[in-house]
Structure formats: structure tokens, C-alpha cells
Amino acid sequence: MDKMVMRGMAAGVLAVFAALSSRAQRTVYVDAQRGSDSHDGSAGKPFVSLARARDAVRALKKAGAFPDKGVVIEASGNFSLASGNLVLDAQDSGSGAAAPLVIRAGAGGAVVTGGYALSPEGFRKVTDAATRSRLPEAARDHVVAFDLADVGLEALTPLPDKFSGWREMEIFSGGKAMRLARWPNAGWTEIVTVIDRGVKPVDKATGEWEHGYKGGTFEYAGDAPSRWRVDKGIWMNGFWCHDWANETLKIGAIDTAKRQITSAGIHSYGIGNSSKWHTAKRRYYVFNLLEELDAPGEWYVDRENRVLYFYPSDGAVNDVVLSVQKQPLIQMVKTVHVRLEGLQFAHSTGRAVSVEGCENVLLKGLRVAQVTTDGISVSGGRNCGLDGCEVYGTGGTCVTVSGGDRKSLAGCGHFVTNCHLHHSGRLQRTQGKCLAFHGVGVRVAHNLIHDSPYIAVMYGGNDHVFEYNEVHSAMMESGDGGGLYTGRDWGSQGTVIRYNYFHHFGQPGVAWQKAQGLSPDYEPLKENVMVMGVYLDDCDSGDTVSDNLFFRTGWSAFVGGGRYNTIRNNLFIECTAALHLDDRGLKRARPGEGTKDGWDLLAKLQAVDWQAAPWKDRYPHLVNVMDDEPKLPLHNVFEKNVAIQCPRFLQMHGTVKQTAVPRLAFRDNLVFGAVHAKDAETFPQDEAGRRRVTFMTEAMPNSAEPDRNGFELQDSETFRRLAPWFTRIPLERIGPNR
């Protein structure tokens, strides 16, 4: 289109807008089915592309005609951004809080995708003998092929020898992600014997991990690998060493005589168990195998020849989408006063929405489903956030938020409220969370968060508030993590975790879902160990965990060697342990010793100048931390907590019983049910017959299956009589406000 035509179109659009009052909010219409970019953007003659509507608003702004009440771009239909994403920058900003730019869905809805709908006519039967011979015999007449060159895909880059998750194209059908051909078809298989871990020993002098230096070798079970073509590229995904480290490794060689596989990829921690905490057999599955394309819904791409092979369900190929867009579908950079409302996003390799360095951006009522990496990202800027959004089925993390300045402790004002975030980590089993937030001053409130194979919520930084959230079904497939997790920072002070309902983590989560008639796609660890509720890992310090309900959440309030943490007024029911405390800092931390220290506890404080203002004023207790037995978990407070039917009240490791517990504040704690001998020994009676923890062997009524909407236990006469100091948890206010 030449410049004269473009000028004419712009003039036409401006003429339409000029006819309206300069104060009235104006609407630009976009319709993916009946629009045209040669139209003027009116209701009767809508544009067809979001980019054209954006450019029309830019022209309006350039002409000085941006209205006092802002502009709305109203979108209807399905928009594919596979060939180019929508970028909004500073010139697309609204002119104020009362005059924003709003992009919203029309009455019929608007769906933004990052993929190509593959034409049913493009699929063909597999007829060449070489390919058919590699396919399982029972699948040969069901698998169809599609030439990806037909949708403009250029040469596909080789996959790396090692990676986490999956950041390449995916196939979707019927609104669901299809599965790369794999063995076994579901779940995991176990390593029989580790032949060579492929890793150097731990450096005992510093407690540091040494990374693998060559591929590992292990023995496998069965004969399936004898069918595979290693030269075509095969990858394995597994929990190779730890239950918190899932990685993908390329296969280097298969010795079918010895039933041994050697990886080409070098795992970060080696292959096989490395400590007493990780004794379960290592599990893995193998994928990207044409030879295992044997079930409906599976697919495989011949990357060299750019051919997709697909085993459709019921033989139908009329609803197949190939995701290819690796950039955020909508990317905002330094925009101000912009809102996205009611849009749906799906089928993209990259994020759905990215908000970078923006101010006063609101994402309202968005629905993001089935993207390959993360769903929504907010980074930098001020006062941006999500309200009433649903994000699920992400390959990685549903939502990530970061902002603020840690050195100045300036808060960002970002928020995540009234959202439903669930089923994360579809492809990144230990990297994908439902929510991750970092920086200073993020508020997370009134959300429903659930179904994560590993950690549901990860955070770091200062002065965050996490309140009125329901979190369940976390840690469904892994270990050494928590529903809420942070770690390795003395300076991550000031975060408050209050008024939340945490329940059914790990094995109890899978059992609970099955009892509801659901079919959870998880294989939990055989033992529900190293599953935590709120996990303050590796000397993390300065957080407050108060007024929460924990039900069947493993080791629930877990203080892993940190300091100045407060655990107050929480209710623990049927948890493996209500509280945990250890002194891991004595063994692993090396602050100020001039030796290698992977935790960098002192270095992180030095980076924010913690002995100068504003740090010394906000957190005065940190100023002299190095003169205060820094490796011991001192100055923690455990008060006004109630534990019911928990096998342990306080789980301890290391020397804390002697070195820390006598010096910590344990006040007004109450335990119901059988008393563990170690708990009774830890909290003996004084000369007056009093304990820092009160043990009651009688059963507490109404404790089974608490429900956040009808939980009556804390209102019972028995409870109020025995725990008069306990402040009622407002369970009725927890979760999204509808």
C-alpha cells in the first residue's frame, strides 16, 4: 500500500473521529471476520487487524485529537498473531487515569492466538516405506503427515543437548495441548542402576556443588530402546538427581546389549541420588520418538525435513493449531494508562502478555490458556497488575511479577488480585509455578491458586503482602519445595503472609482430587516427604507467617535456618509437622569467610548497602548481623499457634534443640492429639508445671475436612476455652471476590 493511500485512509479515520465530541470516549472497532484495514474503524466498517487499530489511535494522538475520556479499541473474533505480535510503546499511552487506552473484547468475545490453523486438506497419509517402517505397526494407517513449509516455516534449529521445559512449537487440537511422541505413553519409568553419575564429588571444604562434566550412564528396563534411531535425535526428561531439579537431556548412545543409555547432555547435578534426603529411584521418560508415535493425540516433527506427523483422535484433523509465535502476543513497553479487558489468549509458544517498564497498566478479566512458556509477565514500572484473570495450562509459570528497587526499598505497587491461576508447569515440571513475584511491594490477594507439580508460588524481595488466598494441590509430583517458597536471602525482610488457606499438598492432594472424581495428571512421590506448606529455605529471614490455616500440607511452616521470622496465630490440622526449624547455615553458609559461598548471604546484603539508610532504619536488627552468631537460626518467634492431629509439632534437624530452641520465643502454643516424645522432651515443664507449648491429648471436635466456607472449629466452645488468645482467621473472606 503506497503512502498516498495510507494518508487518505488516515484522513478518513480522523474525519470520523472529528465528527465526535472531543470530550467523549471514542471507540475504534476491529473485527477479525468482517473487517478490513481499508475501512475507517467505525462500528459499521471495522478494521480487521489489531495493529491497524493501534495505528489509527496513534494518528489520532499525533493530530492532537485524543479525547478527554480516552479511547477504546473493541475487538471481536479470532486474531492470529503468528506472523507478528502486537507491540504497544510509550506513544500508545493514555493521557491520564480518566483517559486511558482500553483494548477490550466485544460482546461476542475476542481470542488472540500465536499459531496457524492447519488446513485439513494439508494432511496426507504416510506412504513412504522408510517412515512407515519406523512407525509402530498398529499406528501406521492412523498417523498423518503435514508439510510445515506450507505454512511458511523456515529451517528448524536443532534442539540443545540440555534444557529445562520446552520452548518450541506445539500442536493443539480441540483446545488441548497434544503430546510429543514418548515412552512410556504416560507417567515415568525408573532407572534400574546408575553406571556413571557423570559428576564430580561435592567440594566438602565449601559445601559447594560441582556441576557434571560429562554425560552419565544408566541401565534401563525392557527392550523399547532397541527400536529407536539415536541419530535422529532423542531426548529424555527426568528427575535425574533431586526431586526439585527436572531437566531434559539428549541421548548420546544406547547399548542394547547391556541395556545402557549414555546422555549427551550434561546434567547439572549428575545422575542418581546424591544424599540421604533423595533416596527414591530416579525417574524419567523419553520423547521426540517417531518409533513411539502410537497413541491418539501424539505428534512428532522431522525437524530436518520440516514434516509434522500426527496421530489424530477419531481421525479428525479439522481443528489442529500449530503454535509458532515466540514473542509475547501483546507486548507493552513503557506504556502508561493502558487497560486490556476481557481478551482471551491461547496457542502461543511465547507469553500471552508482557508488561515491561509500564505504569498504571491494568489487565482485567483476561483468560490465558495453553501457552508453551509463561502466561503473563509484569516487570519493572509501577502500579501495574492483574484483576479477575484466569491463567492455566501454561508450559511454564502462569504469572510472573517483579518491580521496585531493593536498594532504596521503593515499592512497585504491582498487584495480582481475584485471579484463578492453576495447572502450571505443564512442560517445565520444576521451573513452572502458578505465580512468581519478586522485588519490593507486590500485593497478592484474594486468588485461587492450585495444581502445580512443584512450587505453587515463589517469591523474593521485600515488603510484599500475600493475603486472602486459597492454595491447594501444590507439590503434586516433586519434593523439597512448598506451596509458597522463598530462600537464600537474609535481606528478604518485611513480607507478610496472612489470612490464607493452604491445603492438600503432595500425596494428599492427589488422593483428594481422586475422591472428587478427578483424574490428576501427576505421579506423586511414594513418600510424602520434603513437602512443605510455607518454605523459608536456606537461611531466608525476616518474614511473618500469621493467621493462616494449613490442612494436610506436610511440614507446614518451615524455617530452614533463617532468622527473625515470625510464625504466629496459625492453625495446623493433620500436617506431618506444624513447624520445622534447622541450623543448615552452620554447614552450608560461608558469609564473610572469603571462601566460595553459593548462598551469597552477606554479598546480597552488601549489594543493597544494608548498613546505610534506608535499610538500617527499616531493618535495624540486620545492621550487626555478622556479630550475632549469624549462622544460627536466632530471633525467630513461634507464638499462638494451634496444631491438631499433627504427628510432630516441631520438627528439628541439626543442633537447634540445644543451640537455638532455648533462646527462641515459644509462647501460647497449643497441641491437640497424641504427643510425640521428642516434642514433650523439647518443651518440658518448668518448676511451676508450665510448658512453652501446651499439649492436650483429648481430641478436638469438628477437625475433619475443614472447609474455608463453613469451618466451625475455631468458633467452638472447646477451642475458645483452651485457646482464648487465638485470633479468629477470617476464612469466609479467603479466595476471589466474585
Image: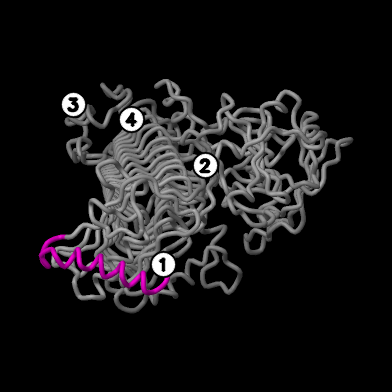
Q: Residues within 10 Å of mark 1 (few under 14, many from 20)?
A: few
Q: Distance between the residues labelled 3 and 4?
A: 14 Å
Q: Name the residue under label 1.
A: 628
Q: How far apart are marks 1 and 4 (CA)?
A: 35 Å
Which comes sooner in the sequence, label 3 or label 1? 1
In this view, the residue farthest toward the right is 257
Q: Residue 716 carries which label?
A: 3
For the point 36% across and 46% down, which residue is it? 33
Nearer to us: label 2 or label 4: 2
| Dot 1: element | loop
Q: Mark 4 points at which residue?
A: 644
Q: Which amino acid does the dot numbered 2 rest on?
A: Val
Q: How crowded is mark 3: few (under 14 residues within 10 Å), some or many (20 or more)?
A: few
Q: Distance between the residues labelled 1 and 2?
A: 60 Å
Nearest the viewer among 687 and 436 is 436
| Dot 2: element | strand
Residue stretch rendered in magenta on the structure = 1-25
Residue 79, image x, y percentages: 40, 49
Q: Which mark is residue 321?
A: 2
Relative to residue 576, is residue 75 depicted above or below?
below
